[in-house]
Image (cartoon, rainbow, N blue to C red):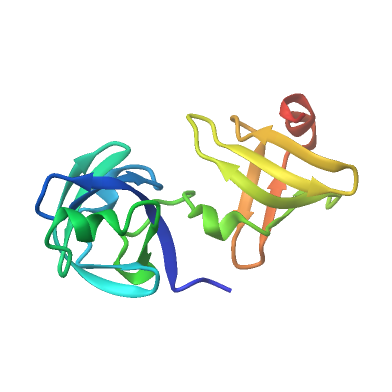
Amino acid sequence: MERDTLQVAAILKPQGIRGEIKVKVLCDGAEHLKDLKRVLIDSVEYAVLGMRGQGEFAYFALKGIFDRNAAELLRGKFIDAYRCDLPELPDDTFYIADLIGCEVVTGSGEAVGKVISVTPAHTDIYTLQSDKGEISFAAADGVIESVDVQSKTITVNKKRFKEVSV
């Protein structure tokens, strides 16, 4: 089942004296968040008055957070966004939240494990829980054959998977 909201940033600290907050972006880059008009922090909705940034850091100005003291109370919390407010993803790109819990199988249907985490990197690192314990693998070229988030299944090439898994 698809979640209505996704965690998109972690609040690091206040920025300046007017209530702006510095965040670490938890998606591919701050540019994916530039058009957000509203966000949620601890299930409280805030209107976005302004956002700037690029890469992995951004600065948000939120309605109701007018000074450094109010911004300080948000330190360490997470920003969620409604899925419908986020930009459309390109083909073969998925939200990490949609990959967690997927069953990983080989092309012949052999069960490998269930995705418990994905670490974003130049080549993302998937961690699986299997009968034999945790297995990690890099999503290098040729490893993942298909992803079906509707049926919660990721199919891997058995030979390539064995080459890159630990």
Q: Residue 68 versus residue 137: which sits nearer the camera?
A: 68
Residue 107 in view (yes/no)? no
Residue 139: name its quadrant: top right
Quarter of the picture holding the N terminus: bottom right
- Left or right for 101, reference 48: right
In the picture shown, does residue 138 fall above or below 86? above
- Left or right for 24, reference 49: right
Residue at the limit of the structure toward the top, as seen here: 163
In the picture shown, does residue 80 fall above or below 111? below
In the picture shown, does residue 104 fall above or below 88? above
| Percent position of residue 49, x then y | 12, 63
Q: Residue 63 versus residue 75: which sits nearer the camera?
A: 75
Quarter of the picture holding the C terminus: top right
Name which residue lies at 69% across and 51% down: 115
Residue at the limit of the structure toward the front, as seen here: 69
| Percent position of residue 8, x then y | 38, 55
Residue 140 in view (yes/no)? yes
Name which residue lies at 21% across and 61% down: 70
